[in-house]
């Protein structure tokens, strides 16, 4: 079952999604400053996003919706393709280690 997020109608819908890749990083979370609250008065009403700049980073940055730059389809394709190639290399290395450890015996 997919998790569901309910957003009040008067908030408007966020422009970006969880785990979406952007030029700023990967979106890990988002929150809303509703009109009439102290945070909205100080910072402005609207969506804010928490992004991790790199996949294994320990840094987390917060951006307003208008500060986030989406990736072009080509940039997204290249990013995902590079990650696939990285994991394929990791799998090949692990398979070699497994063969070396078992002397070629596999239980597949």
Image: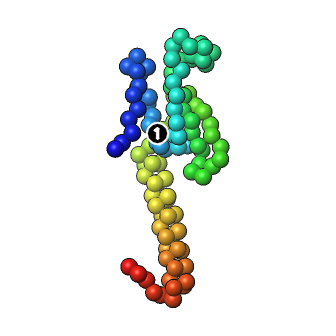
Q: Going 34% across and 44% down the picture, which residue do you hit?
A: 1
The residue labelled by disc 1 is 18
Q: Going 41% across and 25% down the picture, which residue do you hit?
A: 7
**55 versus 14 height, above or below:** below
Q: Is residue 61 left or right of residue 80?
A: right
Q: Residue furthest bottom?
A: 103
Asked if residue 67 shows in the view, the reply is: no
Residue 96 % position (x, y): 52, 79
From the viewer's side, name the closer residue of 98 and 52.
98
Residue 75 % position (x, y): 47, 48
Q: Quick one: quadrant of the C terminus?
A: bottom left
Residue 54 % position (x, y): 59, 48
Q: Is residue 61 left or right of residue 3?
A: right
**16 versus 39 height, above or below:** below
Q: Residue furthest left?
A: 1
Asked if residue 102 shows in the view, the reply is: yes
From the viewer's side, name the closer residue of 53 and 99.
99
The scheme the figure's colours follow is rainbow
**2 versus 46 height, above or below:** below
Q: Residues within 10 Å of mark 1 (few under 14, many from 20)?
A: few
Residue 71 % position (x, y): 47, 42
**108 versus 51 height, above or below:** below
Marker count (numbered): 1
Q: Going 55% across and 79% down the picture, which residue do you hit?
A: 97
Q: Residue furthest top?
A: 36
Q: Going 52% across and 40% down the picture, which residue do you hit?
A: 27
Q: Please tell me in which quadrant of the rendered image residue 52 appears.
A: top right
Q: Secondary structure at mark 1?
A: loop
């Amino acid at each position: 079952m997919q998790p569901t997020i309910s957003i009040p109608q008067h908030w408007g819908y966020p422009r970006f999604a969880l785990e979406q890749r952007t030029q700023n990083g990967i979106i890990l979370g988002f929150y809303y400053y509703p009109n009439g609250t102290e945070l909205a008065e100080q910072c402005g009403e609207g969506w804010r996003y928490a992004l991790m700049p790199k996949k294994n980073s320990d840094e987390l940055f917060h951006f307003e919706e208008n500060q986030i730059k989406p990736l072009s389809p080509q940039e997204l394709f290249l990013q995902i393709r590079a990650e696939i190639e990285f994991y394929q290399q990791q799998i090949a290395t692990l398979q070699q280690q497994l063969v070396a450890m078992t002397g070629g015996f596999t239980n597949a």
